[in-house]
Amino acid sequence: MNEAETRAEHIDPALKLAGWGVVEGSRIRREVITLGRIQGGGKRGKQDIADYVLEYRNRNLAVVEAKKWDAPHTEGLSQAKHYAQKLTTRFAYSTNGRRIYGVDMETGKEGDVPAFPTPDDLWHRIFAKRNEWRDKFAAIPLHKSATSTTRYYQEIAVNRALDAIANGRDRILLTLATGTGKTFIAFQIAWKLFHSRWTLAKDAGRRPRILYLADRNILANQAYLEFSAFDDGVCLRIDPAEIAKKGYVPTNGSIFFTWS
């Protein structure tokens, strides 16, 4: 039995039995993590593709690597660990359809497991302590569009920033290289804050106010266009010269863009 047959006849049903793709909010994805290192002649190296990414409440919780029926069930372990490190998932699994080997990437505990854990089981293992804002942020999916795809490291940056906010931190610094999509990450963070009605005033009835401050006018303009997925009237462009002239700051919006 080859790998494809093993997946279809044994691994897929085992994941379904555990509730993956069945329990509301759970999803199984086959994910291209990286396109491969760019090599000479316009060619790329081997892609990083996880056989299964287990997602629940819009968070990646585990990766599963599948091997054919007669291969050792630990044969995909190094790949599973590698992909778990890339995606920063807490758990990694390797299986041949007959046996399952699991790894807790945080504690280092590993060994055979009798079955795949359920979505709720994994969630509570990772997030043992309940956090109201973390759960509210998780309930809002990342915005998806036909023109942009969220890269794995962008999703990690968004989740880490929001986890810090949920834990009460009020100063957060994200540092990324040029061209990695910092404005897109800021948009996704603002999207979740806005739609979860996050507010420091603890008034869940209103939308939060967000200031996007750039060091150049052109960058503020670019960000304003990047946030176009928000409904009309949410985003407001502020001109410092107009503020100086009129003597007040407009407040008829929720996300404000300006430069300093």
Image (cartoon, rainbow, N blue to C red):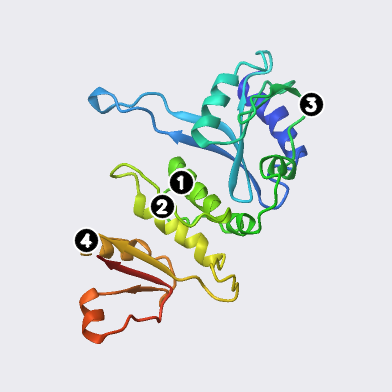
Residue 52 at least partly seen: yes
In this view, the residue in front, 12 or 189, is: 189
Q: Residue at x 28, y 61 (%)?
A: 214
The three-letter amino acid code for the residue at tag 2 is Ile
Q: Residue at x 28, y 44 (%)?
A: 178
User: What's the distance in space between the residues labelled 2 and 4, CA to CA?
Assistant: 19 Å
Residue 147 at least partly seen: no
Q: Secondary structure at mark 1?
A: helix
The residue beneath circle 1 is 157
Q: Nearer the viewer, mark 3 or mark 1?
A: 1
* Numbered badge on residue 185: 2
Q: Nearer the viewer, mark 3 or mark 4?
A: 4
For the N terminus, give its image quadrant. top right
Q: Are marks 4 and 1 in contact (CB under 8 Å)?
A: no
* Numbered badge on residue 223: none
Q: Nearer the viewer, mark 2 or mark 4?
A: 4
The residue beneath circle 4 is 216
Q: Secondary structure at mark 4?
A: loop
User: What's the distance in space between the residues labelled 4 and 1, CA to CA?
Assistant: 24 Å
Crowding at label 2, few (<14), some or many (≥20) Cα neighbours within 10 Å? many
* Numbered badge on residue 114: 3
Sequence-earlier tag: 3 or 2 = 3
In this view, the residue in front, 75 or 205, is: 205
| Picture layout, residue 221 above or below residue 1 | below
The three-letter amino acid code for the residue at tag 3 is Pro
Q: Are marks 2 and 1 in contact (CB under 8 Å)?
A: yes
In this view, the residue in front, 228 or 196, is: 196
Sequence-earlier tag: 2 or 4 = 2
Q: How many marks?
A: 4
Percent from the top left, x then y, of residue 102? 68, 25
Q: Is residue 65 left or right of residue 260?
A: right
The three-letter amino acid code for the residue at tag 4 is Arg
